[in-house]
Image (spheres, rainbow, N blue to C red):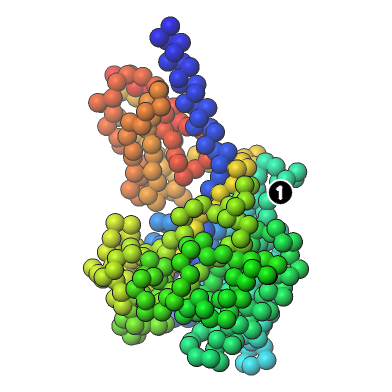
Amino acid sequence: MMKKSRILTLLVFVIGLNSLVAQETFKVMFYNLLNFPLQDIPPNRIQYLQTILSDYQPDVFMVCELNNEAAGNDILNMIQQSVNATYSMANFVLNTSDDTFGDQNDLQNLIYFDSSKFLLESQAEVTTIYRDFNHYKLKLNTIQQNTNPIYIDFIVCHLKASSGVDNEALRLQMVIDLETYLDTFPPDSNVVLAGDFNVYTSSEDGFVELLDTSNNIVFKDPANRVGSWHSNSNYLDVFTQSTRTQTGLGGATGGFDDRFDFILTSQNMLTNTDLYYVTNSYKVFGNNNNTNCFNQEINSIDCAGSDYSFTIRDALYNFSDHLPVTLQLQTTQSLSIDDVAIVSPIEFVYGNMIDDLLVLKVHPEFISNQTLNVYDSIGKLIKTINTKNSIYINEDMSMLANGLYYIVLPQHHINPLKFVITH
């Protein structure tokens, strides 16, 4: 009877593990790249971006201030080699909105995405009086995509910078041009607007227009931190600029005192059941919400905290004067695993019959800071293993009892790996 009970418990556990796959979570990031790569101090800036993306590992990565297509391809190659081999990017398009006053075309927007999870359906440019809004329509690569497709309209922007009445008026006009475009959307569309808004307070007309409840597409601030942000330490948790106080690195100085970068979602994404914003997932990447960080440099001891290490904050400091903003989206549909070429990130070196030493090989594209959870046959978490940027893992299992165990990779949608300890 005891044996049957254990078997039943194990079956329930395995079924439970597999059912987790039915709820997919997607990590989204927006980042102002600071005139990349023409801003060449410090040199080889892409190494810092690699550190940042390897840590967060976004499924969707939106950017502004990208200079040219070659740089866009360099970023894609870096991501594919160091972060996620299945990453793709949309077609690079030069800004056309400035054609009437200089046609400099030096600050572009772009989107990158995990092509195992998203399919690019279309892209378009919304011209304004200053810079384009770039619209990318992605479809979730789900099992039900033919009968019940889920689309997300990602829009990337970079509004006119600087304070003053004239610049506020230009930002408002850009937003009005966007709203005119959004009037053609079905009102229940899933829309994500990400960008460097360059606004100082939520009372600015351009920001008010985005949140106007009479619009066809009504945007919401998922962080729920609407207010007067500039130099107001009460909103430090959503500050994104500046990471620096010293000159010579490009961009703004003055320290940490502004919220310029945003990811807004359409109102329905806060209440949808098939695709929705994950509550409390909105974060400024690198911001430890340390009150001592006000007006300081992001890599200083004043900005230390448990969420983001010095290594991450130093990479952010060296790469841009902005911090990235992130959030998570979730769907109840399952990914179409038949259409996704799934490669197991790890494999047993000497088979899955273990005496005292578990030896695993991690495929190079999955090396960076992967977490492996080891469960026993009744579903109890026994230990957590971190790859620590190593190709080979040697883990002592001498203290574990004989029996069946499972390795679960929470970052990847693959079946648990089984191994047996036989001392």
Q: Residue 107, located in which quarter of the rendered image?
A: bottom right
In the rendered image, is residue 194 in sight?
A: yes
Residue at numbered disc 1? 149
Residue at the image position 41 percent from the left and 72 percent from the top: 240
183 or 284: which is nearer to us? 183
Residue at the image position 30 percent from the left and 83 percent from the top: 246
From the viewer's perspective, is residue 6 above or below residue 243?
Answer: above
Q: Position of residue 71 (x, y in %)?
A: 53, 72
Image quarter in which the N terminus is found: top left
Number of labels in the image equals 1
Residue at the image position 32 percent from the left and 71 percent from the top: 298
Q: Position of residue 52 (x, y in %)?
A: 41, 62
24 or 383: which is nearer to us? 24
Residue at the image position 37 percent from the left and 76 percent from the top: 232
Mark 1: give few (<14), some (14-19) or many (20+) Cα within 10 Å: few
In the picture, measured across the screen, residue 316 lies left or right of residue 196, that is: left
Image quarter in which the C terminus is found: top left
